[in-house]
Every structure is written in C-alpha cells, then in structure tokens.
Amino acid sequence: MERLDKVLANMGVGTRKEVKQLIKKGEVSVRGMVAQRADLKIDPEADELWVGGKKIVYKKHIYLMLNKPEGVISATFDPRHRTVCDLVPEEFAHFKPFPVGRLDIDTRGLLILTNDGKLAHELLSPKKHVPKTYFAKLDKEICKEDIDAFEKGIVLDDGYKTLPARLEEGEGGVYVTIYEGKFHQVKRMFNQVGKNVTYLKRIKMGNLTLDPALSKGEVRELTKEELDCLWTL
C-alpha cells in the first residue's frame, strides 16, 4: 500500500504539492469515491484512480523503443551533448527511464530505455550473450576470409579475442551480429580485418527488431509482444 499523493506524483499528475491541491479541490477519486486525504493508503495496481474526470492507469515500469539518431549520446545527462533521455516525451519522462547499454555518438538505431533495473540487468549480463545485430557500410567489400575470421572471433587491438560473430553480405552493406558489447566493438572488429565503418545502425537486440516505421529520434512504448520477446531471452 502506498500514499495517494506519492502514487499520483510518480505517475506524472503533478508535484506532491500540486496533487494535494487537486485532492483538496475534490478532483481526485479512488474506487469511485472522492478522496479526502493525500495520505490515503491505496493499492495502485488494484484501485481505480481518477483525476479531473480522467482515468489514471498505473504503471510501475516503462519500456521504450528509441530509434537513436547520430549526434546523441547514450546517457541520462551530459553537460555538453544532447542525450537519449532528452528525446523522451514528457508523458514518459517522469518515469526517469535510462538507456539499456549504449550506442556510440555516431551510431544510430535500436536502443531500449526503461526504469526496470531487473530487465536491464538481464539484457546486459555478460553471462546471457544477448545477440545484437547491426547494419554497417564499409569503405571496402568483405570477403570469405573476413566472414571466417568473424566466425572464429577477432583479436582486437588490445589483445582481447571477441566471441564468435556472424558476418553476412547485404544490399548496400553488411550485417554483423555480436554476442557481447565491448567499447566500439563492431568498428574495432572491422578495423582488424582492414575495413573502416562509415555507417552503423543497430537493428536488432535479442528477438526485438527496430520498428521500421519509427523515425530517427522517435520514441514509443514497447508492445506486450515485444516486451515478452525480451523477457524470454
């Protein structure tokens, strides 16, 4: 059980002070009855809440898909650059979502944002080896030797050998799937076989595919089916 004013504030209805004013004005009802006290104990998942004639649907966690554009960093705050959290619409911002993992500033594509630490841990755990697929454009064409090298794992410039990865030719570029997330990993892997990445876009994480209808910089909630894809990794 939680305080009524805290629940409504967490749902973005207003600050605790603003919520208390709404309650005083009789604009808040719980279970069909006008609420009299801000400290009323409620079950937010079971009790029906209305504010100003509008039903408030309680959510503890938020799960968002972002088509990250270039020039934006994967962080909650940065004094110099625009962050992915700056792209989150106001209706979701009060949940304080954070990016699950990161994409480089010049890499675009699929990024998940959530306030669910458990899901984030599941997706980022090194033990899970969650696959991540990218579409890349290179300054040179790949050859069979490159595909074989990726399948065996690439020794990076610092001596670390990556897990086996999948490299495939595609229309206008290549597709690469990795099972870990080292710093600048995709670019560094291609550098080790003599290629430079000129364009990089993440299109898939686990079984979740970037919505092709999502414009650069656009955010939307995951559907139940998409969320189930992530939890069943």
Image (spheres, rainbow, N blue to C red):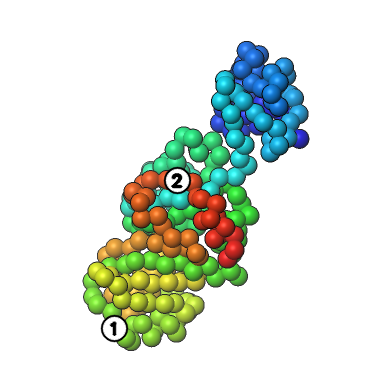
Apparent side of residue 149 relative to residue 195 in the rendered image (left or right): right
Rendered residue at 45%/71% (across/down): 178
The quadrant in which residue 167 appears is bottom left
Q: Position of residue 51 (x, y in %)?
A: 59, 23
Q: Residues within 10 Å of mark 2 (few under 14, many from 20)?
A: some
Rendered residue at 56%/25% (across/down): 54
Residue receiving disc 2? 220
Q: Position of residue 151 (x, y in %)?
A: 43, 82
State which tag comes first along the sequence, 2 or 1. 1
Front residue of 173 and 55: 55
Residue receiving disc 1? 143
The answer, for residue 194, to whether it is visible in the render is: no
Rendered residue at 53%/55% (across/down): 225
The quadrant of the image that shows the C terminus is: bottom right
Q: In the rendered structure, which amino acid carries the disc numbered 2?
A: Arg
- Up/down of 100 relative to 90, above or below: below
Which numbered marker is on residue 53? none
The quadrant in which residue 189 appears is bottom left
Apparent side of residue 121 relative to residue 113 in the rendered image (left or right): right
Q: Position of residue 169 (x, y in %)?
A: 31, 76
Apparent side of residue 161 relative to residue 104 in the rendered image (left or right): right
Q: In the rendered structure, which amino acid carries the disc numbered 1?
A: Cys
